[in-house]
Amino acid sequence: MPLTLWRLEEALKNNPNYTMTSVASSLVKGGVKLVQQFDRPYLSPEAQQRNVLLQLLKKAEYTAFGKHYDFSQMLLHPDPLYLFQREVPLHDYDKMFDEWWHRSLAGEPDVSWKGYVRHFALSSGTAGAASKYIPVTTDMTRAMRQSALRMFSCLPKYDVPAHLYIKDWLMIGGSASLQNLGHCYAGDLSGINARRPPIWIRRFYKPGTAIARIPNWDERTQAIVANAPSGM
């Protein structure tokens, strides 16, 4: 068992409320295999980026974007990186949205990524459009969760006391109350993630999904304060 999970298990067992937290412990154990896959042989950044490119090409091979730029041919080429750099131009947001992402936002599947896009992150304070719609796919959400778990697994390197693993974690971001566009939802990226936090973190996540869904910032802050443990 990875050291992080062992420490968490020990902390749970030493907790007076172990009978209540043992469920959380068993759920964390379910992440053992996922954490173990991070223990890979070292690869140079260049080699890792090439591997990621190949994975992306394979995943998007039969999308409209992949067919347009002939990802199938790239995967057969001796040097896919060279062919990708030669055939696929740089896209800024406006070019990507005007040519491709607007179709995903309209509900079309398999545009630049496999399947339907159910969530779009709204950016603010940027040049150009008042709000920019960034597709948030299921694979993107999964990758973010794996990255979070990987960061969690690194905590033993910093000699974090075992009891801190079962402390509540206050995470404040955008509202988890999203705009319903009919076939998809749009809102802050942090709000999209907070709407359905990973099952292994729900026991510790504060302020909780109910408060996170309050759309008004001031009202959400007041709810956080009202529900904070006394004596802090």
Image (cartoon, rainbow, N blue to C red):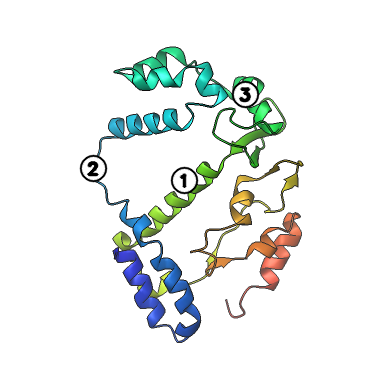
Q: Amino acid at mark 1?
A: Ala
Q: Quadrant of residue 55?
A: top left
Density class for disc 3 (Cα within 10 Å; few <14, some 14-19, many ≥20) is some
Question: Which residue is drawn at the image coordinates 45% and 13% (left, top)?
Answer: 87
Q: Is residue 156 left or right of residue 73?
A: left
Q: Amino acid at mark 3?
A: Trp
Q: Does dot 3 land on a helix, a strand or a loop?
A: helix
Viewer-closest of 196 and 64: 64
Residue 82 coordinates in the image, percent (x, y): 35, 16
Residue with the most extreme left position:
41
Mark positioned earlier in the residue sequence (2 or 1):
2
Question: Which residue is drawn at the image coordinates 41% and 78% (left, top)?
Answer: 12
Residue 88 coordinates in the image, percent (x, y): 47, 16
Determine which residue is flagged by label 2.
42
Give the CA distance from mark 2 to mark 3. Answer: 36 Å
Residue 99 coordinates in the image, percent (x, y): 63, 19
Q: Does dot 2 land on a helix, a strand or a loop?
A: loop
Mark positioned earlier in the residue sequence (2 or 3):
2
Determine which residue is flagged by label 3.
100
Q: Which mark is residue 143?
A: 1
Viewer-closest of 101 and 64: 64
Density class for disc 2 (Cα within 10 Å; few <14, some 14-19, many ≥20) is few
- Confirm or deny contact between disc 3 and disc 1 (CB under 8 A): no
Q: Does dot 1 land on a helix, a strand or a loop?
A: helix
Give the CA distance from mark 2 to mark 1. Answer: 20 Å
